[in-house]
Image: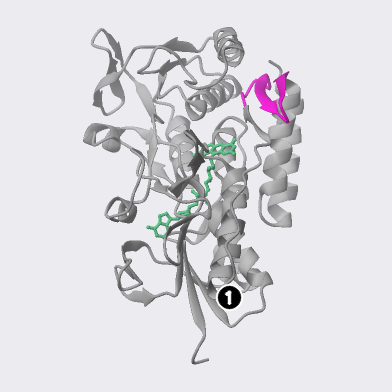
Amino acid sequence: MGNMRKVIIIGAGFAGLSAAGRLSRYNLSTEVLVFDKKDSSAFLPLLPDAIGRRLNPGLLAYNIDELSRKLNFKFIKEEITSVDLQARQVFTGRSSYAYDALLISSGSQTDFFGNQHAQLHSYALNSVDDVKRITDAIKADKFENFIICGGGYTGVEAATNLWLLCRKNGFSGKIVIVERSAQILGPLPLWMKSYVRNNLKNMGIEVLVNSVTEDIRQDRVSVSGNLLFEKAMLVWVPGVKTADFIQKLAVEKNPQGRITVDEYLRFKEDCFCAGDASFFGRKGNYLRMAVQFSIAEGACAADNIIRGMEKLPFKKFKPCDLGYIIPMANNKSCGMVFGLNLKGFLPTLLHFIMCIYRSSGLRNKIGLAGSLIRSCLFTDS
Ligand SMILES: Cc1cc2nc3c(=O)[nH]c(=O)nc-3n(C[C@H](O)[C@H](O)[C@H](O)COP(=O)(O)OP(=O)(O)OC[C@H]3O[C@@H](n4cnc5c(N)ncnc54)[C@H](O)[C@@H]3O)c2cc1C
C-alpha cells in the first residue's frame, strides 16, 4: 500500500466518469478518488425536454455511489474549493487531499455575469433541481409571459419546451427569446438559423435580437428600455462559466475561464483537464462544449495519467466530431450529423437515441425510451 499512487478527479459528469471508467480498466496500484458536490450525476442534454415532455427528473440523475462500486473508485461528496498546484493538494470546506495526478472535469455553471437581480429572480437551466424549480413554479400558475434570456441552443430548446408545456397545460403564455447580438444561434450555418427562426415563428415564439433584459424583479422584467413583461418567468441561459475554484487557479484560460490544455489535455505536469472545463483547440479552432468531446477527453486524459505514471509517451487527443443537433420540442429539429444537413423528425429521433445511449443505468435508459417514444407519438407540430 505504501507506494499506492493517488489520482484525484474533480467532477463526476461525462468527462470525470469516462476517465474513472477508463482508469478502472488498468490493473495498477492506483487509488482513484472522485469528488463531486452532488450525490448524483446529471444528464444535462435532456433538461429542456424534461420541462416540455414532462420527463421524470429521476431519470436524469444517476447515483454516484452506485457508479463508484461498478467502476471501482472512491467517491467523496464534497465541493472542491481550491487547488494548490505546487503542493499537489485539493481542498474542500472540510479537509485537504494530496494527489499524484489530477484531472479537473468540473464542467460549467450558469453565469449570471454579476447580475444579482438575475441570480435572485430568474430561473437557470443547468441542473435537475433547476428543472424542478421551473416546473413547480409553472404549476403554481402565476405566469403569463416566459422570457428566455439568451438565444443559444439552450435558449431555443428551453423556449420550444415551454411552448410544449403551455400547450399541454392549456396555457396561452407569451414566449419571447431575448438575444443581445444581431442573431440567435451565433456561429451556426445560415440555413440552420433561418430554419430555426421559421420554426419558432410557426410556434408563435417571438425573438428579440439586439435586445437585453434590464430591470429584473420578482416575476417582472423589462427588455431594452421599452418593453415591460409582468407576470413573467425569466429563464436565464445567456452563458456559462467554469467552477469557482478554477477562477482562482493561476493557469492560462479563455474568457469563459476554461483551462487551456495542450495536445495531451495537460495544463501542468501531472495535471489534466477534460470536458466543459477544458479549452482544447488547434490553429484557432476550439471544441464546443458537448457530451461527445467530454467523454472522449475524459478517456484520453485517463490514458495519459497512466502513461505519465508509467513514464510512457503521452497520447495526443484527436477529437472526432460526429455533429450536433438543435432539438426542438415540436419535433422539427435540425442539425448536422456525419456531415449531413438534417431537418425535421430524424434529428429529433437521433437526439433521443444519443441521449438514451449515453445515459447511465438500465432503469434510466428504459424509462427514458418509454417516455420519449410516448412524447413523440403524442406531440403533433
Ligand atoms: C440545458 C443543456 C442542454 C445541453 N444539450 C446538449 C446536447 O444536446 N448535446 C451535447 O452534446 N451537449 C449538450 N449540453 C452540454 C453538455 O451537457 C456538456 O458539454 C457536458 O455535460 C460537459 O460534461 P462535463 O463532464 O465537462 O461536465 P458536467 O457534465 O457538467 O459535470 C461536471 C460535474 O462536476 C461537478 N462539480 C462542479 N464543480 C465542482 C466542485 N467545485 N467540486 C466538486 N464537484 C464539482 C458537478 O456537480 C457535475 O457533476 C447541454 C448542456 C445543458 C446545460
| Identity of the residue drawn at 46% across and 10% down | 206
Q: Quadrant of the C terminus?
A: top right
Residue closer to the observer: 296 or 20: 296
Residue extending furthest bottom? 2
Magenta span includes 335: yes
| Count of number-bearing discs | 1
For the question of whether residue 190 can be seen, the reply is yes
**Residue 279 in the image, given as x and y percentages of width and height:** 45, 44
| Identity of the residue drawn at 58% across and 75% down | 310
Question: Is 37 positioned to the left or the right of 371 in the image?
Answer: left
Residue at the disc numbered 1: 310
Magenta extent: 327-343
**Residue 240 in the image, given as x and y percentages of width and height:** 39, 38
Residue closer to the observer: 274 or 169: 274
| Identity of the residue drawn at 48% across and 77% down | 6
Q: Secondary structure at mark 1?
A: loop
Q: Is residue 302 above or below residue 289?
A: below
**Residue 248 in the image, given as x and y percentages of width and height:** 27, 54
Q: Is residue 20 above or below residue 166?
A: below
Magenta span includes 235: no
| Identity of the residue drawn at 56% across and 79% down | 30
The answer to whether mark 1 is within 8 Å of ligand 1 is no
For the question of whether residue 56 can be seen, the reply is no
Badge 1: residue crowd in 10 Å (few <14, some 14–19, many ≥20): few
**Residue 8 in the image, given as x and y percentages of width and height:** 46, 69
